[in-house]
Image: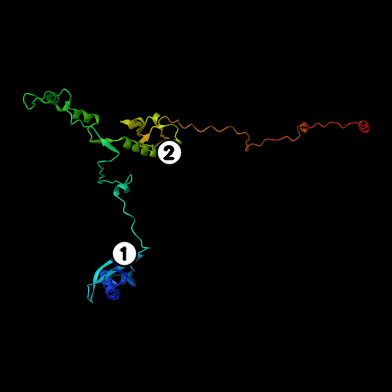
Amino acid sequence: MRSRTPDRLCAEAVELARQAAAEAVGPAAVGKHLGAQADGERVVTHTFECLDAAYRGWHWAVTVARAPRAKNVTLDEVVLLPGTDAVLAPQWVPWSERLRPGDMGPGDLLPTDADDLRLEPGWTGEDEPAPNSVAALAEEEDLDITDPAIQPAPARARIGAIAQELGLGRPRVLSRLGLHLAADRWEQAHGPQTPMAQAAPASCNSCGFLIPIGGSLGQAFGVCGNEFGPADGQIVSFAYGCGGHSEAAVIPAPPAPSELILDELVIEPLQLHPDRSSGSVEPDAPAEELGHA
C-alpha cells in the first residue's frame, strides 16, 4: 500500500535527484524543483521543471528509494512525463482507418482482410470436375482412372479453363455491399448532382464518347473516352454530363448587326417650319374684319 507521507531521507535527496536528471539530459534542460510524492514505502519521486522548448508542459520525474534500515538513498529511474498542459501527440489510429483514397503510391501494398465485407467468395470450378468427363464418370461409377489407356480431358474442356475465360476464376469478387459502395463513390465524383452535370446540354447515356463496361454496374456506369472532357478515362454515371457531349449543338454564328437608324456622320437638314419653306406669306386679315371681330 502506498504511503501518504514521503520518507524523510528520500524526500531530502533533492540534490541527488537533480544531479541524476542533469547527468541524463544535461543541466540546461532541468529547471526548478516542483515537489516530491511518495510512491511507496521509502520510495519517493521528485519532479523538476523541463526547460526544453520542445517539451512545453512536461517535467522530469526522478524516483529514489531507500532499503529498510539503510541511511543511503539510491537512484531508481529518470523519466520525462507530461503535465496537464503538455503538448501531446494525437491518439494513434490504425492505418486501416487513416487510409484515404489516393494515399497509395508506387510500390505500396494494401492487404485486404479475410472477412472484408466488400468481398465475397468467387467460383473457380477447380473443386468440381467437368460434366461428362472421365473424372466425373469415374466418380459416378467408382472407376480407376489411372489406366494409361484412358486419356484425361484436355485442359480446354475443363470447367476451370472456361471459368477463367468468363472471369469466374477469381477467389473473391465484389459483394453487394462492395458494389453499392463503389457506385456511391462514382456517383459522388461524376454523377447527376455535380455542377458540371447540372450545366451539361445532355447526359452521358446519349454521348458517343461513352465506353460501356461489363458487370452489373455497367447498367448505370461507363468510361468517358473524350480526351477534352473533364472525366476522360474515368467512370461516369449515365446521368452525368459535360459540355463535351458528342451531340452538343454547334455554337451559332454571331448575329449580323442591324442597319443604322441614325447616321451621325451625315448632315441632314431639319425644317423647323415646313409651312414657311416656300417663302409665301398669307395676307393679313382686313381691318374691318378685325374691327367686327
Q: Quadrant of residue 120?
A: top left
Residue type of the residue flagged with mark 2: Thr
Q: Which residue is mark 2?
A: 194
Measuring from the top left, give residue 122's x and y in whole percent. Answer: 24, 34
- As drawn, is 227 to the left or to the right of 124? right
The answer to whether residue 212 of the structure is visible from this angle is no
Instruction: Please tell me the numbered disc located at residue 81.
Output: 1
Quadrant hosting residue 15 = bottom left
Which quarter of the image is occupied by the C terminus?
top right
**Left or right: residue 242 compared with residue 168:** right
Secondary element at tag 1:
strand
Q: Nearer the viewer, mark 2 or mark 1?
A: 1
Give percent across and percent down for residue 244.
Answer: 41, 34
**In what quadrant of the picture does the N terminus appear?**
bottom left
Name the side, left or right, on which 155 lies relative to 74.
left
Q: Residues within 10 Å of mark 2 (few under 14, many from 20)?
A: some
Is 55 situated left or right of 23 in this image? Answer: right
Residue 215 position by quadrant: top left
Q: CA distance from mark 2 to mark 1?
A: 51 Å
Please tell me whether residue 14 is drawn above or below residue 276 in the rendered image: below
